[in-house]
Amino acid sequence: MSRLDSFIRRLTAQRDILNHISHDLELPSEGAVMEIGLGNGRTFDHLRECFADRRIVAFDRDCRAHASSIPEAENLVLGEINETGRAFETGDAAFVHADIGTGYPDKDAVTLTWLPQMVAGMLAAGGIAASGLPLEHPALQALKVPESVPENRYFLYRKRD
């Protein structure tokens, strides 16, 4: 598969997961959405449409998003995510989306030493997490992804009560 086809497949899976969460899954009635990895802001922009009634906090090393897809200053957290995200491990987020995989197994292995704990720490009981990397953590229960999402392309979890 070409890198272009793989990219399209990843973005299609991401869109399908986000739409599934916003339309089909129950989230806690309170709580923000956490976007771990702002990137160019396309996903953040989609989250604004899907979760218009919620605060969306975006994290990234630095801001390189399109001008139309940059959160307000109070909702943009810049710096090393494994450090800046710790302040948000308050257990009250309704949804955490993490798309910070690199496609390099050695780099992703390092990310997976801290990302599952951070996501679990951010989420409220019953909250949902979606990730491009598998999040192995005892507080996270794996959920089925929509049929349109290829196996191991995206991962979906609910935080246990």
Image (cartoon, grey):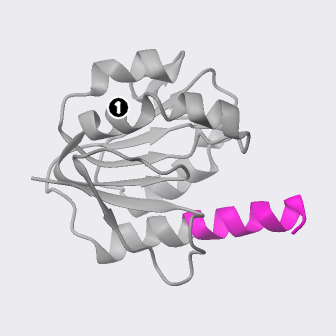
The magenta stretch spans residue 4: yes
Residue at the outermost bottom position: 147
Give the total of numbered labels: 1
Residue 146, x across and y down, in percent: 46, 79
Residue on which the image places disc 1:
118
What is the crowding at mark 1: few (fewer than 14 residues within 10 Å), some, or many (at least 20)? Answer: many
On the image, the x and y values in percent for residue 107 come to 67, 31
- Image quadrant in which you'd find residue 5: bottom right
Residue 45 versus residue 145 in the image, above or below: above
Spot occupied by residue 87 in the image (x, y as percentages of width and height): 30, 18
- Provide the residue span drawn in magenta: 1-14
Question: Can the viewer see residue 111?
Answer: yes
Specify whether residue 80 is painted magenta: no
Horizontal relation, residue 118 to residue 152: left or right: left
Residue at x 56% of width, y 75% of height: 149
* Helix, strand or loop status at disc 1: helix
